[in-house]
Image (cartoon, rainbow, N blue to C red):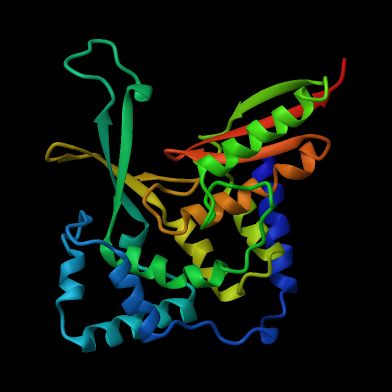
């Protein structure tokens, strides 16, 4: 709680000091919205509004223009519709057959957001293109893969062992760090990365209305507010995950750190080279 209050205060102070006149008014184009629509594959599951991506792909071109105007209006007022904040969570059992004693670890949660929200997310991801990353970062980066990360780990180990040194490996599982990330910390990091203030404002509102309903067969639970983390299914989740990962490196500067993503489960390899 104290951390949340501290981060929120820092964010509010930075927001008050932000010189928004130094930024051109944020807006997205019809081309960006059209590209965002084409990024979403056909037969994607719809949200609670039952609007499918095919409704936009097969609609008259004027619909894209109208949608663009609405999105730019969202950016201008710094708010999104309440439906954009609601995700339907379907728990998928990890086990086969029947199991008497189960807990939440026995289920894989699949979150479905409304299609218009996904389109808007894809359309504004261009505002995060300039986020800098470490050369030691492999996960969530275009052109990088687990094979490259594992290759670097293997080559580094071989380099030192061939010279008579002993390599000590430490493994830290951080796969759930992003589900519990402090939203004020995320917004504060975006401020430090000089992301457009209007985009940060709309994300602040988006986080504030984030909620989820559990869907089990045809039954829906009551809505539960989400006070931390970034929901699954959000298009800019990789961007925020990448941003959060950069905060790990300064604490491990004496070590060689390789962060990779394996089936969305993140693992950090901390290699400390010691000679005996």
Q: Is residue 144 above or below residue 155?
A: below
Question: From this viewpoint, which residue is outermost toward the right?
Answer: 276
Q: Is residue 81 above or below residue 58?
A: above
Q: Is residue 100 above or below residue 250?
A: above
Total tally of numbered discs in the picture: 0
Residue 260 x/y as whole percent:
56, 40
**Res 180 seen here:** no
Question: From this viewpoint, which residue is outermost toward the top?
Answer: 100
Q: Is residue 227 left or right of residue 153?
A: left
Q: Residue drawn 82% across and 25% down?
A: 163
Residue 125 x/y as whole percent:
48, 68
Question: From this viewpoint, which residue is outermost toward the left?
Answer: 218
Q: Is residue 271 left or right of residue 260?
A: right
Q: Is residue 97 left or right of residue 199?
A: left
Question: In the depicted view, which residue is nearer to us: 192 or 222?
Answer: 192
Q: Residue drawn 32% across and 32% down?
A: 108
Residue 148 sits in which quadrant? top right
Q: Residue drawn 50% across and 45% down?
A: 229
Question: In the depicted view, which residue is nearer to us: 8 or 37?
Answer: 37
Residue 97 x/y as whole percent:
16, 16
Q: Residue drawn 46% across and 71% down?
A: 124
- Image quarter where the C terminus lies is top right
Question: In the depicted view, which residue is nearer to us: 154 or 194?
Answer: 154
Question: In the depicted view, which residue is nearer to us: 45 or 253?
Answer: 253
**Res 234 seen here:** yes
- Image quarter where the N terminus lies is top right
Q: Is residue 12 above or below residue 260?
A: below
């Amino acid at each position: 709680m104290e951390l949340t209050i501290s981060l929120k205060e820092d964010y509010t102070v930075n927001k008050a000091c932000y010189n928004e006149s130094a930024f051109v008014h944020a807006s997205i184009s019809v081309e960006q919205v059209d590209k965002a629509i084409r990024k979403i594959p056909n037969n994607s599951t719809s949200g609670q509004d039952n609007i499918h991506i095919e409704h936009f792909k097969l609609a008259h071109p004027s619909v894209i223009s109208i949608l663009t105007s609405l999105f730019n209006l969202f950016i201008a007022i710094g708010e999104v519709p309440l439906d954009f904040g609601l995700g339907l969570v379907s728990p998928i059992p990890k086990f086969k057959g029947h199991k008497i004693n189960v807990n939440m670890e026995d289920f894989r949660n699949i979150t479905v957001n409304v299609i218009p929200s996904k389109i808007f997310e894809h359309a504004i991801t261009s505002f995060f293109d300039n986020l800098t990353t470490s050369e030691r970062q492999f996960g969530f980066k275009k052109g990088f893969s687990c094979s490259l990360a594992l290759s670097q780990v293997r080559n580094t180990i071989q380099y030192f062992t061939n010279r008579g040194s002993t390599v000590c490996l430490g493994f830290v599982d951080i796969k759930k760090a992003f589900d519990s990330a402090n939203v004020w910390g995320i917004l504060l990091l975006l401020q430090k990365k000089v992301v457009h203030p209007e985009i940060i404002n709309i994300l602040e509102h988006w986080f504030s209305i984030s909620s989820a309903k559990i869907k089990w067969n045809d039954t829906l639970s009551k809505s539960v507010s989400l006070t931390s983390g970034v929901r699954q299914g959000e298009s800019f989740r990789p961007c925020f995950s990448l941003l959060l990962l950069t905060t790990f490196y300064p604490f491990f500067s004496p070590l060689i750190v390789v962060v990779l993503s394996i089936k969305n489960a993140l693992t950090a390899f901390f290699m400390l080279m010691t000679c005996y």
